[in-house]
Amino acid sequence: MSKENRVKIAERTNNPVLKFFSENLGIIAALIVISVIVAIMSPVFLSVDNALSVGRQISTNAVLTLGMAMVIITGGIDLSVGAVVALTGTLCVGFINQGMPVPVSVILCVGIGVLVGFLNGVIIAKTGMAPFIVTMSTMNIGRGIAYLYSGGLPLRCTRDDFAVLGTGYLGPVPLPIIYLAALILIVWMLLSRAKFGTYVYALGGNREAAKFSGIPTVKIEIIVYTLSGFLSGFAGVVLAARMFSGQPSVQQGAEMDAIAACVLGGVSMTGGMGKVGGTMIGALIIGVISNGLNLLNVNSFVSNIVKGIIVLIAVYIDIIKKKKMLKG
Amino acid sequence: MRNYVLEMKGIEKKFANVYALEGVHLQLEKGEVHALLGENGAGKSTLIKVLGGIYKADAGQIMIDGKEVTIQSVKDAQAYGINIVHQEIVLVPHISVAENIFLGREPVTKAGLKDKRKMFREAGELVKQLGLDIDVKRDVYHLTIAQQQLVEIVKAVSFNSKIIVMDEPTSSLAEREVEYLFEVINKLKQQGVSIIYISHKLNELFTITDRITVLRDGKYVDTKETKSTTIDELIKMMVGRNLTEYYSRGEHSIGGVAFEVKELAQKGVFDNVSFHIKRGEIVGFAGLVGAGRSEIMQAIFGVSSIDSGEIFIDGKKVKFKNVQDAIMHGIALIPEDRKKQGLVLKNTVGYNITLTVQDQYKKFVHINRKKRDGIIDRYIKAFSIKTPSPEQLVNNLSGGNQQKIVLSKWLATNPKVLILDEPTRGVDVGAKSEIYTIIDQLAQDGMAVILISSELQEIINMCDRIYVVSQGQVTGELQREEFDQEKIMYHATGGK
């Protein structure tokens, strides 16, 4: 299909599935190529078990990516996501071990994630401090509290009624994948159908024009960071349940994986552009690379190198693409 | 045969398969001010970029002082004495005027350090030569836009330019500052510098230029002596047809007072501002750049806050907490800087048109596509917005079409009071005329229209009444029969 035709289909169709494929052809092709390579080198890759395991593994990063995508589209960044995962997971296990009922503890800890996000949003929107600085600070604070609370050690929790949240199944599908699917649907609806999403794009595309257009920019910005906090908090609790423990050191650098997934998925780091679908493929690519290298028994440090290189290439391609688009 | 400093002959430039320039000529005499005129997309900027070494021509000759030359880069162009003063100011704000002038070619002391003293001295001499009053030791951000524009010109002169290209140098200057610029241009002329002058403001050309070359659709149309041509003839050459009426004015049936403000003030910005607009009336706000007109309107619209004063709509007192409030009360503001304040450039035509009216077709996550497409199509058709599709990025459209999109976006909110801040800035003649027709039609349909403009002709021809603003105060009010350029300037410079 010629490029022009592709663009035309993307423009004309209201069918979200067709639109998704035509907009993300490049990155889908990349995903297929990487998958084929991994599958040839390690046939186990294609087994149902491994596929579900990849799904479970990426679910945390993918949930963080959903929040990160919204934040980056507003022109900001949220470095605190990994720390919030560690904080909420650790606290949740700790609270349960201290005798707090599981549902209360879960809700409370997701609420803590919401609170961190809300604080990020309020500080950024009201003071005009740079998102990078604000969320880097809350990242350090969050991680610090997690270590302080747990004394630096993982807190174990083997209670079934908690663990099931992360290890359970709905039919043959692991629960974390079900959560992810639901969250993707919600965030996609918010971004591409609700007026909230339209405003999010306006904020990142041109904040001044958004203000002149009567868009409540402060409110939208606070909501976006709060949502990112909620998603991180949720991911943290589910991860703790899946690992039977709350670990203060977990998900170090998770913010970088989420940013990488966004960039791979075509989110512009300067804001105003990007879609949920693309970022999820981005998260898949990162997951498949980690999983593949793991299956091939490659040192896990190599996976960092590979991820770094892939992000560089993806961003370069993206820059060329956008230049062309803006020139028409 | 006359001696030309510069001759461009049969210049051709193709992008992909489209001719941006086809057989374009330009002949420049020594000490001449030569206007380059044409609508947006006529090829003026492409020609200038060829001259300045940014683009390479596919065919044609460039001769300087009768000798054929090839210009491959900006450095080449500067070596031949050609310098371009771009429309956008590209000075570094937090260093001094002198350092800006010598940026990238600073004189150095024996120790290899920047020789500031020499820089200040030489820059000071240049400034004095042109009869300017600018302190070269000051940081650029202290200067007004007009002064910064002049610094750009000084910078061009500092290269010992024989030819200076000025791309819309007056687009952000007020009338008085324009006169100042013209004095500088005349000084340069006397020194034998030739100037290529690009501007959309036709009446300016008659004050400052000697000859005018017109381009249309990338082709050379003609070169005229300024003395022996008229605005009508120039417009005809530019658009290739007669514009029967450049400004439109139909019958306005003026109704009751739709909008009124009393004693509005914002500390240090404006004070004691009172005015009213009636239904079906176009009311102009004249004044110098920086008089506070935009600030007053933005404060009314809720972009900034008001310290004291009252606002009335249809006689009822209202208060706007923010922009949303103002929109809900039927106010729309088309801001002065369309790229910064009006549009999300990297999003689509459809997106921008509907940005202000999300509530009209969205309910939570349900989108009424038919209604949305209806809104978009209505304005694309009504204003003949030239775009391949509603999904085109706004960034890729011309200034005129962009401005029509900003208009659409605000008219979609069904305003009762429409505030237009410099609605035709940077818009070509054809689109300008169309925008005038739209504005006039809105007034005929009963809308109360406020028109802020730095072009006096625009205000005089379009408006029913004019308020003049000077230093944050309303200094005069004129009825249509009293309209007079001198009277307006008298009030604009502070006379009451």
Image (cartoon, coloured by chain):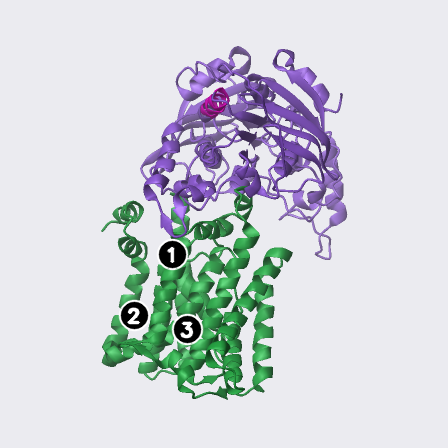
Q: Are marks 1 and 2 in contact (CB under 8 Å)?
A: no
C-alpha separation, residue under disc 1 versus residue under disc 2: 29 Å
What residue type is disc 2 on?
Answer: Ile
Which chain is mark 1 on?
A
In this rendering, the answer to whether B436 lies above or below A182 is above
Chain B tint as drawn: purple
Q: Quick check: is B438 in the magenta stretch? A: yes
Pointer 3 and pointer 2 on the same chain: yes
In this rendering, the answer to whether A82 lies above or below B186 is below
Q: Tell me which label, 3 or 1, sits earlier in the chain.
A: 3
Q: Which residue is painted at 41% across and 59% down in the image?
A: A316
Q: Is residue B237 left or right of residue B271?
A: left
The magenta span reads B432-444
Tell which chain the image draws in green: A
Which residue was labeled with disc 2?
A34
Q: Quadrant of residue B277?
A: top right
Which residue was labeled with disc 3?
A60
- Mark 1 crowdedness (10 Å alpha carbons): few <14, some 14-19, many ≥20: some
- Say which of A15 and A8 sits in front: A15
Q: Tell me which label, 1 or 2, sits earlier in the chain.
A: 2
Q: Quadrant of residue B204?
A: top right
What residue type is disc 3 on?
Answer: Thr
Which chain is mark 2 on?
A
